[in-house]
Image (cartoon, helix red, strand yellow):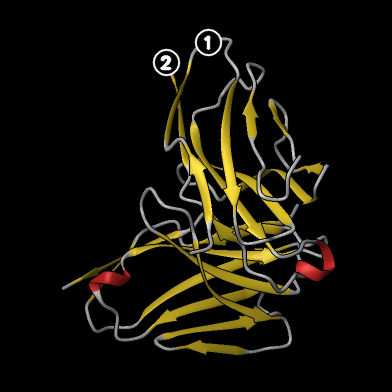
Amino acid sequence: DGGITQSPKYLFRKEGQNVTLSCEQNLNHDAMYWYRQDPGQGLRLIYYSQIVNDFQKGDIAEGYSVSREKKESFPLTVTSAQKNPTAFYLCASSPQTGQGGLNQPQHFGDGTRLSIL
Amino acid sequence: SQKIEQNSEALNIQEGKTATLTCNYTNYSPAYLQWYRQDPGRGPVFLLLIRENEKEKRKERLKVTFDTTLKQSLFHITASQPADSATYLCALANQGGKLIFGQGTELSVKP
């Protein structure tokens, strides 16, 4: 079955440490996204990528970095500069973004829950 | 600034009744509106999409309305079942193609 796989499901970060969250999709989608979800808040966009080797900042990119070296993969690194990293992180994909993607649903993984040790 | 509001309080209803969830938005002219279901510890799952020129959309027991004058969408689940218990998210697509999500409404259907 096609879908999005996020790993690990749970992750703990120590002070001053960078951690990387994995996201892989086999849907052949061009666009991929990273969201952060906090209790009582909507999903907030961290970064998105419309094509390999290209990505754009979302609304809350500070303290995070991404790469898109392959179509299938869009890893997110939570750096030590992110002072409040505890959250549920969701990766999503869609066939397209921009004007062509307006009517396309996003497919989500089952998230990674990040906590501070 | 653009804002999306969903019922912040959980909605508790009896099995068999119709659940109605609200999504209001301000400072926004979305071309599309989407509804997702999210179960605890899982990612959201797409349910329905409605365009700005559509008044209503149906899928099995689900119905969505979109009133661009009131800047509101209503999401209905008829003949609700305990398995419908989840958090429901609305999301608006802006002209840049990005989705802006509401905070979600938790629905609990009691047998």
Disc number at residue B110?
Answer: none
Question: What residue is shown at x 80% (from left), y 47% (from top)?
Answer: A52
Q: Are marks 2 and 1 on the same chain?
A: yes
Tell me how many marks there are.
2
> Residues at badges 2 and 1 in contact (C-beta under 8 Å)?
yes
Disc number at residue A15?
Answer: 1
Within 10 Å of the Cα at label 1, are there few (<14), some (14-19), or many (20+) other Cα atoms?
few
Question: What residue is shown at x 43% (from left), y 61% (from top)?
Answer: B105
Dot 2: what SS?
loop
Query: Residue most toward the top?
Result: A16
Question: What residue is shown at x 24% (from left), y 71% (from top)?
Answer: B82
Circle 1 marks a residue in which chain?
Answer: A
Q: Earlier in the sequence, mark 2 or mark 1?
A: 1
State the residue position of label 2: A117
Question: Marks 2 and 1, how far apart in space?
Answer: 7 Å
Q: Amino acid at mark 1?
A: Glu
Residue A19 place in picture, x, y as percent: 57, 23
Q: Quadrant of residue B19?
A: bottom left
B42 vs B19, nearest the viewer:
B42
